[in-house]
Image (tube, helix red, strand yellow):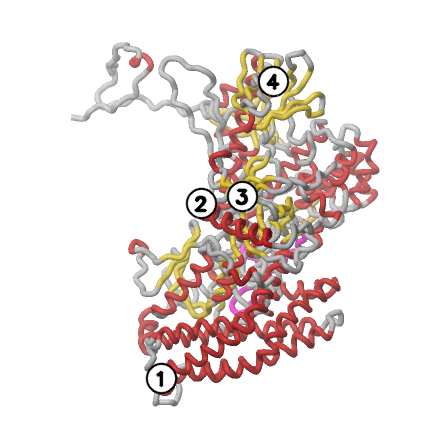
């Protein structure tokens, strides 16, 4: 017997009405006819570019269905910043409620046009991570200017209109610009400032539409009326006022002047009663105020309700971490409104875009005579994530590229177009180069990490296909597909990174596992052999790094007369002998390992199963190189001096760093010989620990260890100073607005991401901790990818206190300085512990100095306007029309450790850098993707918190890289079906890679060095370091 399905209770049943059992009149075996599908209704929506689109929805569908259709039509990821507004039957402009049925709100759909507009205006346009989103915001600013909603002075208005014109017609042409202003109305009183507009337009030569959007939003966001929508009201005395809501709270205007503001943190409750709007404030003990309720009279109850709803939504969007959950419905009576915010909060949007694998697709600017094409950014599988974006390649509309031309830049849904192949190098195809000048198009660089287009790292873990990126001209550029780039084509014509090219994937050569096992068994199994083999593999990498200095760099600077001969001769005189010595050392190690493995003609293997005698002989030879090694610090200082004194030399060195062979900052190569001494010491320590005292090789290893320890001790002071000096030089390139970062006595301690609490809420900031001050910055969105300084806190006299309970923000602490206090929050308890420990240590260092350091990091006058918080100068609207930021004058730096920390929300200390120097490693590994079957052999180098991948150790430059900050290294579980020995797994979110080593020793070494990069050290700086400066 089949039991009847349970039915939900109706309202009548809950109130006690008898249950009604219906009697069927159908013949046995017949069913009631299916209900006809809901009738479709056409809804017209006007977009921000003034086009109208018609969408079909069912009669009963909620507003969210229509809104999602609009976002899908635009391929818009960050759609939650926008909304649909319309005029109801009362002629009031209201927002479409996404939870209620559309037709219950829009009573006459045939006669109503909904408008797709910006609903939530963020305080900082850099929080808009997608280029299309910034373009739509720029259209909203353009509309607000034309309608008179965005009121400002003539200087700001002229500057904004000039950016709009630049994006629409391109570079300034007097006749064309004048005609364009005559036929287009951007301001109500445009004619009065036409000359100012043209003067500003002249200064934007070379500025792409994407950059124009960015500059337009940069000006607009600083205006008092930015994003303000006024709601008329009166106070208790009957004075005519206007209310508005912003990310900070509720604002009060008299005319267009803001006269009061109530921050969300001070508001206890917002409500309305009839046509009175009530703001209940939290009592202020300092003022002993008893009046904690403010009352404003509005035109009607409906006006109050409309404003109250948008206040609720603004508060939820900017202040909450996630969408509020609906309240349970009461059975009998309701009290108050059930309205709630629906959609993702701003934090959820930012996290979603960062975590998703996104990809750009082309989109057209309706009012622009320039077509911008996307250049292989991220795309998600969901329709809300297929965000169309433009590239920096500008093409006149009359010559739009066809699908075959655009195929290598973007993938369309369901089909792929293969780009034309110009040449092939080492099995990798080169894509034709697309001219680019877009400062927002972040290009990957070569410093062991990767760049982040639209705040998304384009590297091994965050690239569109979830695979390591290609290193192009030392740049790893995927966005800028240049001639000579190592970007490969997949079997279906897709652009893949080198690690998924036919050379390195299962489509290429896959090792036979049985053959590999047989080969492994033929080689020695003694741990000493694998320690000696580590010496060989790392020596090969070291010699290759020396060749970057004495061959690649010397040949590059020899072609330019601007580079001074004394500096070139100094480098040559102190690095050539070291290179020559290590060439001979490498040959001896290779010969000894060949004899050890039995691959030579020597059959008496007992005398050759050792490495201590080779090390002892050559380390004694290193004593003759002590003077050149001591001169290496002088080479670094002299190179920096000539770069500072000559712009041509600085440009020459920066261009060399863009070459593929220079896969790290060049200054790091200059310190390689000093670092190599540490490696010899660590290898000898492992050998002495492994050998028993009676072993034949123990005596030589112990003697060699004593010699190398003496050399290291002799050079250790200079080494630590040079490491700090090199790090300050590298950070100097990552920061803008700083004149004197590299000064005697200043020591770098830690850098990383913290959230700063301000009137705008929690905002991500990059903090830089030095021995005398603390800087906080934000990442620029122009071509340089530098970080601009927002504030500077001297450490002298500073105190620190954990204030999680006080502010209600997890992992937060407050820094109390002499001039200002800053509340910051870490991403987790461990990060907070590291920051608090290092800041307290830095405060101790500052207190121990002879006097307070008043010579803080000063900024040039042109960069003072970049400072926004604390003691920073406030920008006036007139200052915004000044010269463009120095960000645009620097080289591209989208891939440094600083950028990786920014995108993965972590931090790195100077101790971590020192540990990474000691833990450099290289050798062959077998690599496997999560969904692939075979294992591919790669030459892998670990340095600078990254893995660099080569086809073999003889390659001049890496094919791809994988920054490891944020990754976890573990052993595969049984469920992963990796039935091999010595396999470790790297995973970051959804990205998983398996690596297989040849022995237990090499497996443990790789796990050790990778953990040193993925797990930040919590150790304090050595006490000796404090005495060095």
Relative to 522, is 850 above or below? above
Q: Kindly identify which residue carries mark 4.
A: 92
Q: Determine if residue 75 is in view.
A: no
Q: Position of residue 999 (x, y in %)?
A: 35, 70
CB within 8 Å, label 1 to label 3: no
Q: What are the residue bounds of the magenta stretch? A: 417-438
Q: CA distance from mark 2 to mark 1?
A: 50 Å
Q: Position of residue 646 (x, y in %)?
A: 75, 64
Q: CA distance from mark 2 to mark 4?
A: 49 Å
Q: Nearer the viewer, residue 428 or 894?
A: 894
Q: CA distance from mark 4 to mark 1?
A: 94 Å
Relative to 357, is 934 above or below? below
CB within 8 Å, label 4 to label 1: no
Q: Residues within 10 Å of mark 3 (few under 14, many from 20)?
A: some
The circle on residue 829 is 2
Q: Kindly identify which residue carries mark 1.
A: 696
Q: Position of residue 823 (x, y in %)?
A: 55, 39
For the N terminus, give its image quadrant.
Answer: top left
């Amino acid at each position: 017997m089949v039991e009847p399905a349970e039915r939900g209770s109706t309202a009548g049943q809950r109130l006690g009405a008898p249950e009604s059992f219906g009697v069927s009149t159908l013949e046995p075996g017949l069913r009631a006819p299916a209900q006809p599908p809901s009738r479709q209704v056409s809804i017209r929506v006007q977009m921000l570019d003034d086009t109208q689109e018609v969408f079909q929805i069912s009669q009963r569908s909620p507003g969210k269905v229509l809104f999602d259709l609009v976002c899908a039509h635009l391929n818009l990821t960050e759609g939650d910043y926008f909304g649909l507004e319309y005029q109801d039957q009362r002629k009031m402009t209201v927002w479409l409620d996404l939870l209620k049925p559309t037709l219950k709100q829009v009573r006459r759909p045939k006669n109503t046009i909904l408008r797709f507009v910006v609903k939530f205006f963020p305080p900082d346009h850099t929080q808009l991570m997608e280029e299309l989103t910034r373009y739509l915001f720029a259209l909203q600013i353009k509309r607000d200017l034309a309608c008179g909603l965005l009121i400002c002075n003539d200087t700001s208005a002229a500057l904004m209109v000039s950016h709009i014109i630049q994006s629409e017609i391109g570079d300034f042409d007097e006749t064309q610009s004048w005609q364009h202003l005559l036929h287009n109305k951007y301001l109500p009183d445009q004619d009065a400032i036409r000359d100012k507009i043209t003067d500003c337009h002249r200064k934007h030569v070379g500025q792409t539409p994407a950059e124009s959007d960015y500059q337009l939003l940069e000006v607009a966001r600083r205006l008092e009326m930015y994003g303000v929508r006024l709601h008329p009201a009166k106070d208790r005395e009957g004075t005519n006022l206007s209310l508005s809501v912003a990310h900070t709270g509720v604002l009060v205007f008299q005319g267009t002047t803001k006269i009061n503001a109530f921050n969300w943190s001070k508001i206890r409750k917002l409500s309305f009663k009839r046509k009175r709007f009530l703001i209940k404030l939290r009592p202020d003990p300092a003022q002993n105020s008893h009046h904690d309720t403010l009352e404003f009279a509005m035109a009607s109850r409906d006006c109050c309700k409309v404003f109250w709803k948008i206040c609720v939504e603004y508060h939820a969007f900017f202040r909450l971490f996630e969408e509020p959950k609906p309240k349970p419905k009461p059975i009998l009576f309701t009290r108050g409104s059930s309205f709630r915010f629906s959609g993702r909060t701003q934090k959820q949007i930012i996290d979603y875009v960062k975590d998703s694998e996104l990809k750009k697709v082309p989109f057209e600017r309706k009012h622009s005579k320039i077509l911008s094409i996307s250049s292989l950014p991220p795309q998600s599988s969901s329709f809300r994530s297929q965000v169309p974006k433009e590239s920096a390649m500008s093409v006149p509309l009359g010559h739009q590229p066809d699908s075959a031309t655009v195929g290598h830049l973007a993938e369309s849904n369901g089909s792929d177009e293969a780009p034309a192949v110009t040449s092939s190098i080492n099995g990798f195809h080169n894509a034709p180069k697309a001219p680019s000048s877009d400062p927002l198009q972040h290009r990957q660089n070569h410093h062991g990490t990767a760049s982040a287009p639209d705040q998304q790292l384009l590297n091994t873990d965050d690239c569109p296909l979830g695979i390591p990126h290609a290193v192009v001209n030392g740049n790893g550029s995927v966005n800028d597909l240049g001639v000579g780039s190592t970007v490969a084509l997949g079997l279906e014509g897709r652009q893949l990174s080198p690690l998924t090219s036919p050379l390195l994937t299962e489509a290429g050569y896959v090792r036979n596992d049985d053959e590999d096992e047989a080969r492994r068994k033929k080689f020695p199994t003694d741990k000493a052999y694998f320690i000696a083999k580590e010496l060989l593999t790392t020596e090969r990498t070291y010699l290759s790094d020396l060749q970057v200095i004495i061959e690649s760099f010397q040949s590059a600077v020899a072609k330019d007369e601007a580079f001074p001969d004394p500096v070139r001769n100094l480098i040559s005189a102190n690095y050539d002998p070291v290179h020559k010595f290590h060439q001979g050392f490498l040959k001896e190690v290779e010969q000894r390992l060949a004899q050890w493995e039995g691959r030579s003609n020597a059959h008496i293997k007992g005398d050759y199963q050792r490495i201590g005698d080779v090390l002892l002989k050559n380390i004694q030879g290193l004593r003759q190189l002590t003077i050149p090694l001591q001169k290496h610090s002088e080479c670094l200082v002299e190179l920096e001096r000539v770069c500072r004194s000559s712009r041509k030399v600085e440009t020459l060195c920066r261009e060399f760093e863009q070459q593929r062979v220079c896969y790290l900052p060049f200054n790091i190569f200059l310190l390689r010989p000093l670092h190599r001494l540490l490696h010899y010491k660590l290898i000898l320590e492992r050998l002495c620990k492994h050998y028993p005292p009676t072993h034949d090789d123990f005596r030589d290893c112990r003697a060699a260890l004593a010699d190398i320890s003496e050399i290291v001790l002799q050079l250790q002071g200079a080494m630590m100073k040079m490491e700090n000096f090199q790090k300050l030089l590298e950070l100097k390139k990552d920061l803008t607005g700083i004149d004197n970062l590299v000064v005697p006595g200043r020591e770098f301690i830690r850098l990383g991401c913290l959230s700063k609490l301000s009137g705008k809420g929690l905002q991500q900031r990059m903090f830089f901790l030095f021995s005398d001050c603390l800087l906080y910055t934000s990442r620029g969105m122009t071509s340089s990818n530098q970080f601009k300084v927002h504030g500077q806190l001297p450490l002298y006299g500073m105190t620190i206190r954990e204030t999680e309970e006080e502010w209600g923000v997890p992992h937060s602490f407050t820094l109390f300085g002499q001039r200002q206090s800053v509340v910051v929050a870490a991403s987790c308890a461990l990060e907070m512990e590291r920051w608090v420990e290092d800041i307290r240590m830095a405060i101790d260092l500052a207190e121990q100095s002879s006097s307070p350091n008043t010579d803080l990091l000063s900024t040039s006058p042109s960069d003072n306007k970049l400072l926004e918080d604390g003691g920073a100068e406030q920008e006036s609207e007139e200052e915004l029309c000044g010269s463009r930021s120095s960000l645009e004058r620097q080289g591209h730096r989208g891939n440094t450790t600083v950028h990786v920390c920014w995108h993965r929300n972590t931090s790195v200390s100077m101790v971590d850098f020192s540990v990474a120097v000691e833990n450099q490693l290289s050798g062959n590994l077998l690599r496997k993707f999560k969904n692939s079957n075979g294992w591919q052999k790669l030459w892998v180098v670990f340095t600078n918190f990254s893995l660099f991948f080569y086809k073999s150790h003889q390659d001049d430059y890496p094919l791809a890289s994988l920054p490891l900050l944020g990754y976890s290294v573990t052993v595969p579980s049984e469920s992963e079906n990796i039935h091999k020995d010595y396999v470790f797994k790297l995973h970051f979110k959804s990205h998983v890679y398996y690596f297989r080593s040849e022995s237990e020793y090499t497996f443990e070494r790789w796990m050790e060095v990778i953990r040193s990069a993925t797990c930040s050290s919590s150790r304090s700086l050595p006490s000796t370091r404090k005495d060095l400066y």
